[in-house]
Amino acid sequence: MTEPNATTKPAAGPVVVGVDGSIASERALLWAAEHAFRMQVGLRVVLVRTHPVPVTAVAPAPVWPWPVVHHRDEQGVAETRKMLTEIVSATIPAKFDDNVTVDVIDGDGASSIIEVAREHRASLIVVGRRGRGGFKRLLLGSVSDEVATYAPCPVVITGKQQEWEPQSTIVVGVDGSPDSDRALAWAAHQAGLVGSRLHVVHAWEPPYAAPDSLAGTMPFLAGDQAELAKHAQKVLDDSIARSIPTDTSLTVTSAVLEGYPSAVLTEVASGDHAELLVIGTRGLGGFSSMLLGSVAHQCLHHAVCPVAVIRPAEGE
């Protein structure tokens, strides 16, 4: 065993993934296992029993998918943990299961996952877009929405399984804000790990004149649009210069596109068959009181690919 010293770099925290027996959480587990393998970090699989019954109650043995009620006694917890371990082994490829820990917790789904991530200084949380508790009409389940809003680290919300070549493109949205710079740096790191193309997108909207102005119903003045487009290109170029080293071996492409940011980003990610869409929590257009900005929220709801929300470290 190597003795620690002052120059030893601290090990990266594990990837924490929440599971609940749904197909959505199975996809999240597979994505998290592959990501942990790429990052060479541990994988911590968390199952939260949100409706335990009293100790004196009688409940059937846990099965997969997990029933609503479970034993709260230690024997029941042990049985649940054993079955979860078997399910994890059967779900993820053997090469990904070298460093896997399972946790069975009684409590609230989102807050329990967040607390596990905080306790173990997780590098990433992964959850499915909608688990067993979600209604079909809800594109984003309450647990995934809550985790993305309050997590102490980056969060990936996995979506539907897509038919595309793996390790193709990572799309990241930027707007010149510190949050988007953080997202771009994180996306560049991920692209470097897997050899993906990094596609950087800045979306902008021209200003619309007030209805009672001299411009009438014209959405913008012709001269203004050219100036705004020039400014938008500078925002993109400056973001890349700040966040990506000039000597990078990454394949980096970029685009300045007109339109509402969330609509543009989800369309680009879909058109590029992106393996991941990366966004910051709150850009220049967000209110400081909003923990999750409107663009991030809408991308989480409507993107077909997994979406990474890059949160600032706690205290920032």
Image (cartoon, rainbow, N blue to C red):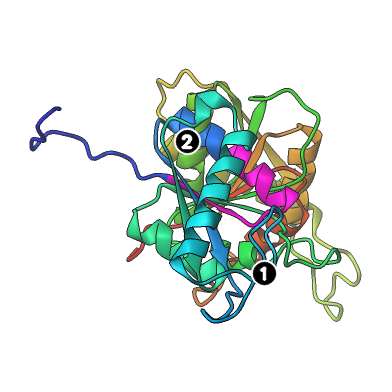
Q: Secondary structure at mark 1?
A: helix
Q: Are marks 1 and 2 in contact (CB under 8 Å)?
A: no
Image quadrant assignment for residue 248: top left
In this view, which residue lies farthest toward the top?
249
Residue 193 in the image, given as x and y percentages of width and height:
48, 26
Q: Quadrant of the C terminus?
A: bottom left
Front in this rendered view, residue 237 or 250? 250
Q: Amino acid at mark 2?
A: Ala
Residue drawn at x 64%, y 36% is 91
Image-based side of 120 in relation to 32, left or right: left
Look at the image and give the residue range highlighted in magenta: 15-31
Q: Is 159 located above or below residue 66 in the figure?
A: above
Q: Residues within 10 Å of mark 1 (few under 14, many from 20)?
A: some
Q: Is residue 238 visible?
A: no
Q: Is residue 237 a member of the stretch shown in magenta?
A: no
Front in this rendered view, residue 146 or 53? 53
Residue marked by disc 1: 142
Q: Quadrant of the N terminus?
A: top left
Give whichever of discs 1 and 2 has the lower sequence position.
2
Residue marked by disc 2: 36
Residue 250 in the image, given as x and y percentages of width and height:
51, 22
Q: Amino acid at mark 1?
A: Ser
Q: Is residue 19 a member of the stretch shown in magenta?
A: yes
Residue drawn at x 80%, y 59% is 221
Residue 49 in the image, given as x and y percentages of width and height:
57, 67
Q: Secondary structure at mark 2?
A: helix
Front in this rendered view, residue 6 or 257? 6
Image-based side of 298 in relation to 94, left or right: right
Front in this rendered view, residue 298 or 221? 298
Residue drawn at x 64%, y 57% is 20
